[in-house]
Amino acid sequence: MTRQVSARIAGAFEHPLRRIPDRTVPQVLAEVAYGALADAGLGVADVDGFFCSEVPGLGSIAMADHLGLTDLSYVDVTEGGGASYPMHVGHAAAAVAAGKCRVALIAMAGLPLSGGGTTGGARGPEHPYEAGYGVTVPAGYALAARRHMHEYGTTSEQLAEIKVAAAHHAQYNPNALLRKPVTIEDVVNSPLISDPLRRLDCCVTTDGGGALVIVSEEVARTLPRRTVKILGHGETVKHSANGRIDLTRTGAAVSGPRAFAEAGLTPRDVDYVSIYDSFTITVLMSLEDLGFCEKGKGGGFVTGGTLRADGRLPFNTDGGGLCNNHPDSRGGMIRTIEAVRQLRGEAAPQVQVPDCRIALVQGHGGSLGFRTAAATLLLGSEEA
Amino acid sequence: MTPHDPVLARLEEGLAEGRLELPRCAGCGTLLWYPRARCPHCMSDALAWEALSGSGTVHSYTVNHRGQGEYAGREPFVIAYVELAEGPRVLSHVDAEPDSLRVGTPVRLGRGLDREGRLHLRFEHAEENA
Ligand SMILES: [Zn+2]
């Protein structure tokens, strides 16, 4: 089948470690950037597009220096929290399609466990109205979860199904932080963090990073490895709407339909999904907003192993942010990399989706309880 | 050092005198939260501060069992979006037993400022002090 392809993902690399006490953020970023270029069969001299946000010092400019990128014609520092990287993929595909660059490098790294955190950022205008209440990251998502439970009857046991599927996958990933399978009872009996969210509803915190290489069709033809087609991209910002925040909906309700329309695809065409899983509720609301089930029916949809590799809609087969990796508290890079593995046929054998042709990546950045960036990608295998 | 914010200062002045006041746009009628110097709907700068009832209902809430920073050791405590009777959903604390709260529970503003005179909305059950 002939599809409109704006660009391709030719290289991907996830740092194998989850705790990195002996390196700096730029050093880890160089490891993953060079790893992705080597995976693509390319070198630093080939890179003419650079996509990098939220790194120490002068950001992307300092990192271009550190990495030795000498011939850049296109630079993008888009900051969308954990959604930054699927945003970067969409922007890189557009830049390649416009002829602004031919080989785009997207890289991220962070060391929240080992103290080499990225820049904190200045205070936003909402700070005096939100900062004094002790709102932790789980608390923001708990506000969304509680409202979803109220409006739609979603239960803690239904949310637990999402963690159970992720943990089932993580046992086959030797690099995953948490590799032990869990039961629904384990999740709903884990300690309350921010009611109704419990410890096992929350993603892991890890050091690490990842990188991707996006290339033009022309460059892709010269490379030895299987590439991944970028078929569709959508993004948006969803915010608190002048005090009328809708806690039960994510930005995927906007970014998803745009990506599907660009790709000429529907949810029924999708073989595998990488869904941002900062918390179990993030996944449930995303699946509804992307149209995999009716709004409000996510709880029933995920029940019974739907999201397992052998289920109707395999998700996060690396173990996701809930079990594998969520470096720098930004999951969009690693979620995209697992979609690339699935479309290349390189996921762990126990969780590889047979004949995986179409994958969806959903990223969110910020907090569902306040304001977020959202980005959706539709990706295709070489056979798609 | 934070630059002076006259909009925040105006909100805190009202609360110091026991009134919850927010700007309403004279151009399009939109009530603003959080308060701003320009209307985010029609861009007007013609804003008139209006006293609100201080009444609302719990739109959503969480009982936080893991406080950080100044909140470590003060758990559990309730963080909520209170939907004011006039419309806006405002982040706040609710001083109530967690088990006594549901989505939809009627609440009213107790205190609006902390000891240093900075904005800090605390709601309580509507029937108390009614
Ligand atoms: Zn207006």
Image: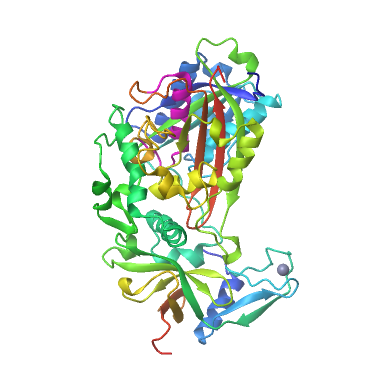
Q: Position of residue A299 (x, y in %)?
A: 41, 49
Residue placed most toward the observer, A215 or A348: A348
Ligand 1 image-quadrant field: bottom right
B38 to the left or right of B114:
right
Q: Position of residue A171 (x, y in %)?
A: 27, 31
Residue at 71% across, 73% down = B29
Q: Quadrant of the N terminus of chain A?
A: top right
Residue placed most toward the observer, A45 or A271: A271
Residue at 39% across, 47% down = A280
B65 to the left or right of A144:
left
Is residue A255 something one can see in this rendering?
Answer: yes
Q: Is residue A340 magenta?
A: yes
A208 to the left or right of B75:
right
Q: Quadrant of the C terminus of chain A?
A: top right
Residue placed most toward the observer, A120 or B124: B124
| Relative height, residue A4 to residue A154 (above, below) | above
Q: Position of residue A2 (x, y in %)?
A: 65, 19
Residue at 56% across, 31% down = A378
Q: Is residue A309 magenta?
A: no
| Relative height, residue A59 to residue B117 (above, below) | above
Range drawn in magenta: A325-347
